[in-house]
Image (spheres, helix red, strand yellow):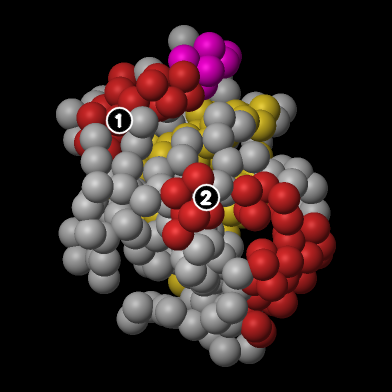
Amino acid sequence: MGRIVQFSDVHFGIENTAAVAAALAYCQAEPPDLVLVTGDITQQGFRREFEAAARWLKALPEPIFVTVGNHDVPYWSLTDRLFHPWRLFEQTTGHPAHDHQFAGRDFMVRGVTTARGWQARLNWSKGVIDLDQCERAAAALSATDPSCLRILACHHPLVEMIGAPMTGEVKRGEHAAHLLAAAGVDLIMTGHVHVPFALPISGDDGRCYAVGCGTLSERERGTPASFNVLTWDARSVTVTVMAWTGSGFEPSRTMGLDRRLAV
């Protein structure tokens, strides 16, 4: 019924140049219903990095949906971090940083911002979720037809993957995940940890899943560069991890996820 390609953590500035070019060619050869990019398109938020990221995004087949990540702030400008954390992202890419959504033929994606320019803890790379923004997203997604695949996109995983090379430590993340699950959201699609995964949200009916994407940068964190290809029908979602071999992408792992049945 549908096909989405998910990229994340491209980190222009330290991108895997060959993998990024091959990922672009993959999408151009068979354009999906949506290209979803879940944050960290730059490494340090420099203008030149955003401009390189914007050129790559514009070369991808439409439609494209992009969320911001913690690396998409101007790291070396305290003033901009405090007062205009997403201005350069929005100016160069043309994508909004907050409350955006896309509706396809039989799916809908809503974005929530989990990254911050600054926060009241030492590690600003960790995540924070605003429950009001989350509730707006849940309401918009739950208003769709029950047969529609409902996707929440953000950068940081709202629930932690055991064994991942890093954590999101999203403030209010578990609360938000359960709120979204209760609203009938099917997938919470994220990046940040640089490894792919698919986990059910506990306490739900087992039909809301956290889906994480790998990186297209040189910061591989023990796993090869990769991206996700998402396909679905009325009964299930299949997540295929496309891993970089050094000369191209090949399927390396497939995860099947049962859907809620529309009534």
Crowding at dot 2, Cα within 10 Å, few <14 / some 14-19 / many 20+, comes out as many
Magenta-span inclusion, residue 139? yes
Picture coordinates of residue 184 (x, y %)?
40, 21
Picture coordinates of residue 227 (x, y %)?
54, 64
Picture coordinates of residue 198 (x, y %)?
35, 51
Q: Residue at x 52, y 76 (%)?
A: 217
Quadrant of res 229: bottom right
Q: Residue at x 57, y 15 (%)?
A: 144
Q: Which residues are magenta?
A: 138-145
Please, what is the dominant secondary structure of the magenta stretch? helix
Callout 1 secondary element = helix
Horizontal side of residue 96 vs 234, given as left or right: right
Picture coordinates of residue 140 (x, y %)?
53, 18
Say whether residue 34 is visible: no
Kind of residue at disc 2: Pro
Q: Residue at x 20, y 66 (%)?
A: 163
Quadrant of res 249: bottom right
> Closer to us: mark 1 or mark 2?
2
Q: Nearer the viewer, residue 107 or 122?
A: 122
Q: Nearer the viewer, residue 40 or 87?
A: 87
Depicted 109 relative to depicted 64: above or below: above
Give the residue pinned by disc 1.
176
Disc marking residue 59 = none
Horizontal side of residue 200 vs 72, given as left or right: left
Say whether residue 119 is visible: yes
Q: Nearer the viewer, residue 240 or 195?
A: 195
Q: Residue lying furthest front in this view?
A: 79
Q: Nearer the viewer, residue 36 or 242?
A: 36
Disc marking residue 85 = 2
Callout 2 secondary element = loop
Magenta-span inclusion, residue 243? no
